[in-house]
Image (tube, rainbow, N blue to C red):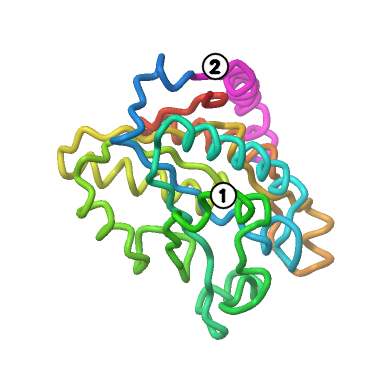
Amino acid sequence: MKTSHLIDDSREYLEFVQNWVEALPAARMQDAKIHPASSALISVDVIKGFCSIGPLASPRVNTIVEPIARLMRRLWDLGLRHILLSQDTHEPDAVEFGAFPPHCVRGTEEAETVDAIQSLPFFDQMLLLEKNSIQSGLNTGLEQWISQHPEVDTFIVVGDCTDLCTYQLAMHLRLSANASQLQRRVIVPADCVQTYDMGVAAAAALGGVPHPGELLHHVFLHHMHLNGIEVVGSLE
């Protein structure tokens, strides 16, 4: 397929996805029938190394910090007590560094939770899940936690990146439930997820891989929707 055909053939779909994302409705906890006692929020990689410092820090990703902190306060006030933080805590020789530059190494400031979340009065009651890959469900203790909390049937997923770690977690939760015939809801509020941007020229200069943030954010939100994940504009 020639590139010109790919661009032309994709235009209608891309216009559809853009309009779909812009029209995503806000969802109220009560109207969406989200019950605090049987729900959990999992925040993915809302840490300094992706928001403010280090080689993978992104201004785009930093914009979701305050919306996530507000959502956490809102959910806590409504009685939700299951808040999990799945966060990169890489070993210094992490195999993943073959694909990404070294980042968020254990014991460094990059691996720390952002200040806006650390300052929440209930931060010490959140559960930290350390991960050494973009998949929150591998070697993190997440599956053990889920098995110990069978009453939790609704998972709200927030964080970064839309097309990487957030996508991997949301899909893991959705597909593992499908495979086991579990009635589980996976909800992603679009205002609380984001991804980074790296243009073609910048990637060439750095020896990296181009990464169109706006495009991938939209397409992966739609792909999660396509797989049965509930994507909403915001959760109130």
Q: Residue at x 83, y 58 (%)?
A: 202
Q: Residue at x 64, y 47 (%)?
A: 195
Vertical order, 234 against 153 (above or below) = above
Q: Nearer the viewer, residue 236 or 62?
A: 236
Q: Is residue 55 visible?
A: yes
Looking at the rendering, the stretch of residues picked out in magenta corresponds to 3-27
Q: Is residue 1 visible?
A: no
Overall secondary structure of the magenta section: helix
Q: Position of residue 17 (x, y in %)?
A: 59, 24
Residue identified by numbered label 2: 25
Q: Which mark, residue 121?
A: 1
Compute the Cα span from label 2 to label 1: 30 Å
Looking at numbered disc 2 in the image, what kind of residue is underneath it? Pro
- Which is closer to the viewer, label 2 or label 1? 1
Left or right: residue 90 compared with residue 62: left
Left or right: residue 92 compared with residue 133: right
Can you tell which quarter of the image residue 190 is in? top right
Report the residue that reaches farthest toward the bottom: 93
Looking at numbered disc 1 in the image, what kind of residue is underneath it? Pro
Q: Position of residue 206 (x, y in %)?
A: 80, 68
